[in-house]
Image: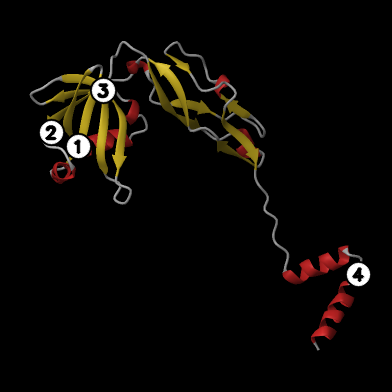
Amino acid sequence: MQQQIEMEVQPREGRGKNAARRVRAAGQVPAILYGLGKEPVAIAFDAKQITKLLQSPSGHNQIVNIKVSGGESAAAMAADWLVDPVRGNLLHVDMRRTDLSLAVEVKVAVVILGVSLGAREEGGHDEVVTREIELRALPMEVPAKIEINVTEMVLGDAFRVRDLPASDKYTVLTRPDQVLVHCVAQKVVEEEKPAEEAVDAAVAEAGKPADAAKDKDKGEEE
């Protein structure tokens, strides 16, 4: 069961690009708090605090108890956020008010533990196919991650959604036959033959002596 994180935020005045720039220049990130039939509230997070949260593996599923200075307090989850494609810093965050008594549908990261027997002793390698699964749970029961131990898998084995242990805390929505990770053989890359060897091979397959073909080509050049 996750713990709520307390975050104090400031109400944000003014709209538009210029107002947003001023908020960012002050070390904050403009945001909006909305949902549950209440009026949206423009707020501003401390940039370092909200960035650290959203960059954590389970940050987008974390319940945040937002306290607006001089205003409301609300449990919320990050619904969406915008990142500068060049600098990588947060530009804006959407926070959705959350009723802790109602189930939510979220995506949770899949984390692989260990190295399979097939990779250690049979020349294979572990390939992750699905890096997150979708599930339904009460907000406070959403797991931070789903761990899979692959140490006993041999070459050719696959771990699917249906192989996950059952839980009374959440319901998995991803289809049961979806592969999460499997142990597969290493791909063998054939070395390219030198150009002359390739010509010899092609001529030989045609039933003509390679030397005769070369002599003929040499004669034509002269």
Front in this rendered view, residue 17 or 195: 17
In the displayed image of the protein, which residue is found farthest to the left?
70
Residue that carries the numbered disc 1 in the rendered image: 30
Residue that carries the numbered disc 2 in the rendered image: 12
Foreground: disc 3 or disc 1: 1
Residue 5 position within the rendered picture, expressed as x and y whole percent measured from the top left: 24, 24
Secondary structure beneath dot 4 equals: loop
Instruction: Name the image quarter holding the C terminus.
Output: bottom right
Q: Amino acid at mark 2?
A: Arg
Foreground: disc 4 or disc 2: 2
Graded by Cα atoms within 10 Å as few (under 14), some (14 to 19) or many (20 or more), the crowding at tag 1 reads many
- N-term-proximal mark, 3 vs 1: 1
Residue 114 position within the rendered picture, expressed as x and y whole percent measured from the top left: 52, 33
Residue that carries the numbered disc 4 in the rendered image: 208
The residue shown at (89%, 77%) is: 212
**From mark 4 to mark 2, how far is it between C-alphas?**
83 Å
- Circles 2, 1 touching at the beta carbon (< 8 Å): yes
- Circles 3, 1 touching at the beta carbon (< 8 Å): no
Asked whether the viewer can see residue 69, the reply is yes
Residue that carries the numbered disc 3 in the rendered image: 76
Instruction: Name the image quarter holding the N terminus.
Output: top left
Is 100 positioned to the left or the right of 189 in the image? left
The residue shown at (31%, 51%) is: 86
Is 29 positioned to the left or the right of 110 in the image? left
- Circles 2, 3 touching at the beta carbon (< 8 Å): no
Front in this rendered view, residue 108 or 174: 174
